[in-house]
Image (cartoon, rainbow, N blue to C red):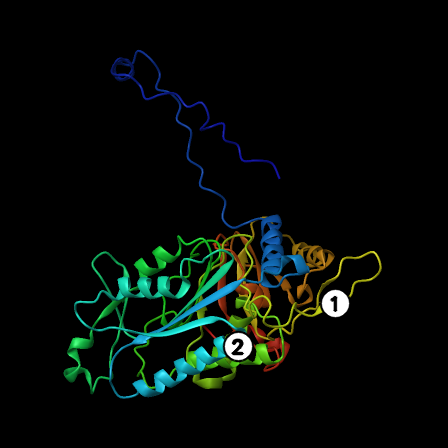
Amino acid sequence: MDPPDDSATEGSAPPPSPDTVESVESGDDEPPEVAAHTPPPEGMTCEELQTILEQSLRSMYPVLPQDAKRYDSVFVLLLLWDVSVLGMDMIQSDVENLARIFEVLYSYTVSVRKIPTFFFEDPQAWVMRMLGDLMGGNVEDALIIIYYVGYGSQRSQNEQLQFLWHPPSSQAPYHANLRVSLNFSSLKDKLSEVDCDVLFLLDSWYPDSSSLGEGKELICAAGFDPLLPTFSCPFTNAFADELTAAALEAEFLTTSMLFARLVKRYVDGLRGLKNPPVHTQLSLGTQSIHLMPVKGTGPTDPPIRVGRSGRVMAFAQPTTSPIEANYTVLVRDATETSADEIKSWLKEKGLPDTAKVDVGLFQHGATPSLVLKIPVEVSYCLPSNISSASLHGYFDPAREPINERSETYFRI
């Protein structure tokens, strides 16, 4: 593909001097010709889409053993508010169950902490102090997992997201002093600077899907504030179930696979998930975080598929979720053969789940579009620069006949 023509901007002349301006105004010289600004073409190219799909397939699951990242240590900080309101004992029980899963089945270093609600204690500073005590300064080849439960929110004047503890409405008059906030935006910014991978698991909402940076990921219960009653943690229980199943079956698990299984639970109506989970986008070309027991404590490696003579061995392809993510992508150079060409190109790469990537042509308006139906695991790994793609929703092919797919979406 030829590079764009930058001749209109290279070697531009400096601003005219006052003398030049006077001569132009007096008509002594013709005014210089001004190059018209041409807006960038709408949509991406087929080649760009191919590259993005390949990168997403590679990020979803490590094809080669050397691509798998196993951490020397994993630190888990589970946070809930230190309050005594109706239903809090049930929440604490769910959190403690999750802590046991991380500690017993994954050999992670785990700490359950209650965020103080006293006015003289800054929750953000307290969280950072607890995290420092847990890690002891050891961040080399480590993973940090921050879990938080609590609904209710507000926007401060500088637009930083704050999570609040909102007790049930019947309790609100008696617990007005519990409106204590945790400034998650500042906490997120601080953790984005640490030299290790970080995974945020929020049993709450988070409205921003943009990338947090390389090695930083976030999965949460909703993309909006549902202000749910705080009597149970369906999102927490759902991913606790998935973590348990993966560990007991000695199955390799990535965050993209975990997210896809949460989406399937939402589609199937399991564990009370009434809202589709959401996530932040991965940085371009990065792997989704691997969730395995720490080195030396569990299965030494994921299952290996033995290659034929002369070929490199590869990981056995995982059992992926059957749920599809449905996209429309503006592709400015798409033709009638583009969909088949992209599928053939991906097949030649020999990556996992390429057979499940379905591409079709859709012409509407001046710019042609390609319709993508891809596994949710692959959707999770789409980079943040795919701005010309629109996600319509999730679909379970097993639920409806193929000819009804376009009408059956689980909207997000």
- In the image, what residue occupies the spot 52% across and 73% down? 107
Q: Assign a secondary structure to mark 1.
A: strand
The image shows residue 62, relative to residue 76, as above or below, that is above
Residue farthest toward the front in the current orientation of the protein: 136
Q: Assign a secondary structure to mark 2.
A: helix
Disc 1 residue crowd, few under 14, some 14–19, many 20+, Cα 10 Å: few
Q: Position of residue 260 (x, y in %)?
A: 54, 72
Between residue 123 and residue 236, name the one nearer to us: 123
Query: Tag on residue 128?
Result: none
Quickly name the residue at label 1: 305
Q: Is residue 320 left or right of residue 233?
A: right
Between residue 350 and residue 117, name the one nearer to us: 117
Q: Position of residue 400 (x, y in %)?
A: 59, 81
Where residue 56 sits, quadrant-wise, is bottom right
Query: Tag on residue 243?
Result: 2
The image shows residue 157, relative to residue 8, as above or below, that is below
Which quarter of the image is occupied by the C terminus? bottom left
Q: Amino acid at mark 1?
A: Arg
Q: Amino acid at mark 2?
A: Leu
Residues under labels 2 and 1: Cα distance?
Answer: 23 Å
- In the image, what residue occupies the spot 70% across and 55% down? 345
